[in-house]
Amino acid sequence: MLKLIKYELKKQMFSKLIILIGIAILEIYFLFGVLKEDEKVIAKAVSIFIFATIIAIFYVGVESISVFNRDLKTKQSYMLYMIPYSTYSIIGAKIIAAFLQIVFTGLLFLGAIIVNFIVIFAKFKDTKEIFRMLKLLFQQLLEVTLDLPYLFSLFFFIFFLWMMIVLCGMFAISLSTTFLANNRFRTPVSIVVFLVFLRLINFLSNVLLLSGASQWKDWVQLLVTGIYLGVASILLYIGTSWMLDKKVSV
């Protein structure tokens, strides 16, 4: 299975190189602002970093779905499902590869942002009070306590939320290329299935966990919801692998 994971990572290596180049350019722009002691440039650089983090993680997930879709539609990639590995191993390798890429991308940006904040604190002594005020303002607006348990639970929740969305996309694609392969409306039907499953998972979360809007204010609720999304992701993986095992593999 390790070979399969390496194969999946190599297929998407170019986009990771582009992301690394983007981080380097942003870092140069940030350091330029620090050297010039230009607070506007620094603020812009930090804001762009945060925005770019969201875009990059979103893109990595979408790319994983796109590659999965291409693997089922092109003859060369389709042959992947004919190799002497179980369908569960092949799909598992794709999911682990997507998992690693999302984590790697997130950690790259998070590391760069942390380093940048350390540089800001070291260069400008007065910024400590500014960041303290921003933290208090954030806590008052969202009515949350920004401590380590909350931040950990928030990242945990967001990560598994995105993984669940990626797997839901893979599930819908698998359905359209297996049981709906001969249906001329397979594409719109698969889109509807994707949206329905997202809605169903959210509905069950609110019913079973009594979460809703309150989950953003309680780190325990965020953590539990993240675990729930992890379980939903596993079920989507099993469903995707089962469909491809029945209709694609030999």
Image: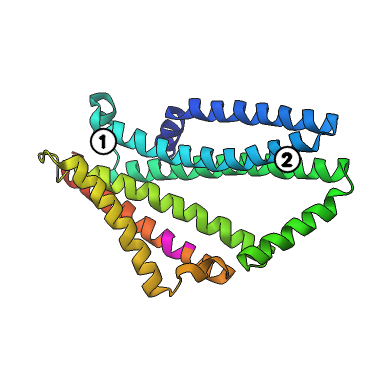
Q: Which residue is mark 1?
A: 81
Is residue 151 or residue 133 the one in the foreground?
133
Disc 1 residue type (three-letter): Tyr
Quarter the N terminus occupies: top left
Tell me, for residue 60, which label it has, or none: none
Q: Secondary structure at mark 1?
A: helix
Q: Residue at x 33, y 43 (%)?
A: 91
Residue 92 image position (x, y, % from top left): 37, 46
Q: Is residue 12 left or right of residue 44?
A: left
The reply to whether dot 2 and dot 1 touch (C-beta < 8 Å) is no
Disc 2 residue type (three-letter): Ala
Q: Residue at x 25, y 34 (%)?
A: 72
Q: Earlier in the sequence, mark 2 or mark 1?
A: 2
Total numbered labels placed on residues in the image: 2
Q: Relative to 78, say whether 87 is above or below.
A: below
Mark 2 Cα-neighbour bin, 10 Å: few <14, some 14–19, many ≥20: few
What whole-number distance in Å separates the C-alpha atoms at marks 2 and 1? 48 Å
Q: Quadrant of residue 39 in the image?
A: top right
Residue 109 drawn in magenta = no
Q: Is residue 232 left or right of residue 214?
A: left
Visible in this render: residue 42? yes
Q: Is residue 148 left or right of residue 194?
A: right
The segment highlighted magenta reads 226-230
Q: Secondary structure at mark 2?
A: helix
Q: Residue at x 35, y 35 (%)?
A: 66
Residue 196 image position (x, y, % from top left): 27, 56
Q: Which residue is mark 2?
A: 43
Visible in this render: residue 88? no
